Image (cartoon, rainbow, N blue to C red):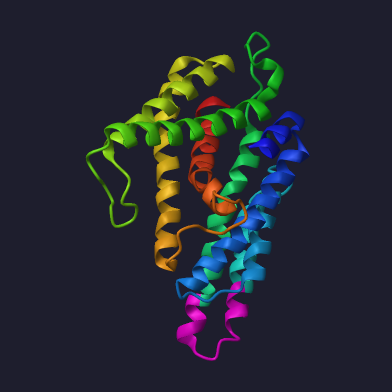
Amino acid sequence: MPPLLIVLVLGGWWIVALIAIATGLAAIEVFRLLGQAGYSSVPVLGVALAVAIVLDGAFPGTLEGSGLILVAVGTILAAVGAFARRDPRDGLPTWFATVFGAIYVSLLGFVVRLGVSAPEPPASAPLAFLGGERGWIILLVLGVWAYDTGAYLVGRRFGRTKFLTHISPSKTIEGLIGGLVAATVVVTVMAVLLGEPPLIGLALGPLLGLAAQAGDLAESVLKRAAGAKDSGTLIPGHGGILDRVDSFLFAAPVVALYVLAVVA
């Protein structure tokens, strides 16, 4: 939390640098988990591709379709890397796993894209001093944290109805509802403080919450396949970087696309 808050205060390239570093570290963990799950890959290429896609998000107008071009180049290079596998039945999953791992982790780059594309709040907005970049990224961060907190507290106190127990045994419908309510309240308040009508937050809050939950479950699938409790040991008591950003991998694209389509 402290590095994130400091970077949000500084803004600009500090945000890009933090997201790029987090993406690189999370990518290392993803390829380690894929290996433990039995899927070989070309980790160096995958990590480089993921970071490149994130950095590309900081220049959305430099070259139209540059992100897709990077994915295409990465897909070709991953295929070439898979040629070294003597058994095509090993080479094919190596190719797939390398591309999947890179694209999966690079979704964190939508935090950067959100900051670059978010509209500036009107001068009369209470949080106008934050600007569009910091204001909307803070909305994303607080929304995800609100969902996680609400889901945990409500689920622990009132949770009875389990769902998707084959992925995460502790998840409950009650916790899901509690998280969605918390996320909607926080996102709506933040939207109003950024000068947007409450309806923006009332619609975006549940979408953000559902995306955050899906991101958490997606990482759980990966960890269960790998037989791992945590993605890593980088953060004592909290696991790895991927454990901290899993919800943002799905929530950031949803918020960025919503802002681009509805708000901007």
Residue at the front extreme, as displayed: 237
Q: Residue at x 45, y 41 (%)?
A: 212
**Residue 21 relative to residue 205: left or right:** right
Considering only vertical position in the picture, is 82 above or below 68? below
Magenta span of residues? 78-93
Residue at (47%, 30%) from the top-left corner? 146
Work out whether 162 lies above or below 8: below
| x then y, percent, for residue 133 | 67, 30
Q: Report if residue 80 lies within the magenta region.
A: yes
Where is the N terminus found, in terms of image quarters? top right
In the rendered image, which quarter contains the C terminus? top right
Extreme residue in the left direction: 161
Would residue 64 appear left or right of 10 to someone viewing this image? left
Residue sitting at x 52%, y 73%: 35
Q: How far from the left and from the top, in percent, is residue 163?
A: 26, 47
Residue 194 visible within the image: yes
